[in-house]
Amino acid sequence: MKLALEMRASVRCEACSTLTPLPGVRNRMSCRNCAAPLDFAARAADAREGGLRHPFGGCFDAVAEAALLLSEGDDCRDARRSQGTPVALRRAMPTCRACDAALPLPPEGSTDVACPQCGDIVAVRWPDEETRSWDPRLHCVIGDGKGRGDAPTPQPSEGVYIKCGHCGAPTATAEDERTRARRCTYCGGVNYLSDEAWLALFPEPEWHRCTLLYALTPRDVFAMATWIERETNKYFLDEAKKQEVAATKARMWAEARAELLAAARRGQATPDELEALSRDPELTEEEASVVDSALSEEARRALGPDAAIALVRRFARSSAPELRALLARHPNADSTTLATLAGDPDEAVRLAVAAHPATTTDVLRGLRKDPSEAVVEAVKNHPRYEPSFLEKLFG
């Protein structure tokens, strides 16, 4: 699944209060008015929960919201109201800034795409350390020309000119020409405007947009549905939307299950993914071995009786009595397992066996002689327990 978010981001200068737009994913810029250095990452960290990641899972998750709740053209919950570092996002496929025509999606590794209508060359940026600091899930950024183009030579009386990278001639720029790829009138070579030139020509934030492209797998969508279910209060979902998210999660689980198990084998499954696998009633003994090896003791205890029976059987081998008791309380525990646990050295485990509805009459008779009064009392209260003739007479 390909998902695209159109992004407009800016940072306000603390020295002169001017809002400088970001022509793509940038952690640092210079103020377009006074040239003061702007540390977008530091400002975002101070300004909002989650810092740069605020709209990408740091607080909200605009990607999850767009994938599961929004239609094309809808605005995301984002950081657009931030006074210092506004970031506005909406679900929209990439379009050409020069003519607004739809752009083709870039093939893997390509450095640019050409607009099929006006021919403008649109840069493509692949993930790097800077983009991953915003969102590590990014597939690529369309319309982000970082590192391209020569720095402009400002001409206060005549605007801005760009030196042609092919022949060195000055390349004229018209104020209404919105293409970043300019053809030299002398040699015909194509020059890509640098960020500085682009900002000088178009200083207003609304002129600067790029597209964050995501290539989502079923595993990704499952994780997003899990996030929204857990953070449902942040998205103000009605019951119909909650059911829609749950249905999507169930559908994605069927497709993502094998991928999650492979991640667990590699030791790369997230806690949410391990929990989902641990609760899967279809978990086999071999799969339970994989999942169990990735779980912490704390995670095993937190699962409770909802854990898959194949996994809980493995808990019986644990040195922790509370995990053995978990198996004894599991609703799907079989009579053979319960008979084994009836001889456990820990009272809490035997007490759980004595109270389990699947415990057989023979096992209950054995527990009737248990040294623990609590276990004996639990046996007496069990609906399957049949007291002997003497017990009926003398209690």
Image (cartoon, grey):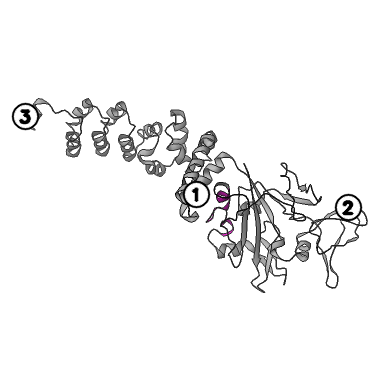
- The crowding category of the residue bearing disc 3, from other C-alpha atoms within 10 Å (few below 14, some 14 to 19, many at least 20), is few
**Residue span colored magenta:** 51-66
Q: Which residue is mark 2?
A: 189
Please indicate whether residue 293 sits to the left or right of residue 33 in the image: left
Residue in view at x 59 percent, y 58 percent: 52
Q: Depth check: give the residue in front, 137 or 300.
A: 137
Considering the numbered disc 2 on the image, is that residue within a helix, a strand or a loop? loop
Q: Residues within 10 Å of mark 2 (few under 14, many from 20)?
A: some
Q: Position of residue 117 (x, y in %)?
A: 79, 49
Tell me the residue at 60%/43% (across/down): 216
Label 3 or label 1, whichever comes before in sequence order = 1
Which mark identifies residue 42?
Answer: none
- The residue tagged with tag 1: helix, strand or loop? helix
Q: Residue 326 in the image: x percent, y percent?
A: 33, 38
Q: Closer to the camera, 373 or 49?
A: 49
Q: Nearer the viewer, residue 100 or 296?
A: 100
Q: Quadrant of the N terminus?
A: top right
Q: Magenta includes 64? A: yes
N-terminal label among 2 and 3: 2
Foreground residue, 99 or 203? 99
Q: Residue furthest left?
A: 393
Residue 77 to residue 310: above or below: below
Measure how far apart labels 3 and 1 are at the Cα level. 61 Å
Check disc 3 and report the residue beneath it: 393
Residue 358 screen position, x and y as percent: 27, 30
Q: Quadrant of residue 380?
A: top left
Looking at the rendered image, the disc whose residue lies closer to the viewer, 3 or 1, is: 1
How far, Cα to Cα, is label 1 from label 2? 49 Å
Kind of residue at disc 1: Ile
In reply to whether residue 89 is colored magenta, the answer given is no
Q: Which mark is residue 228?
A: 1
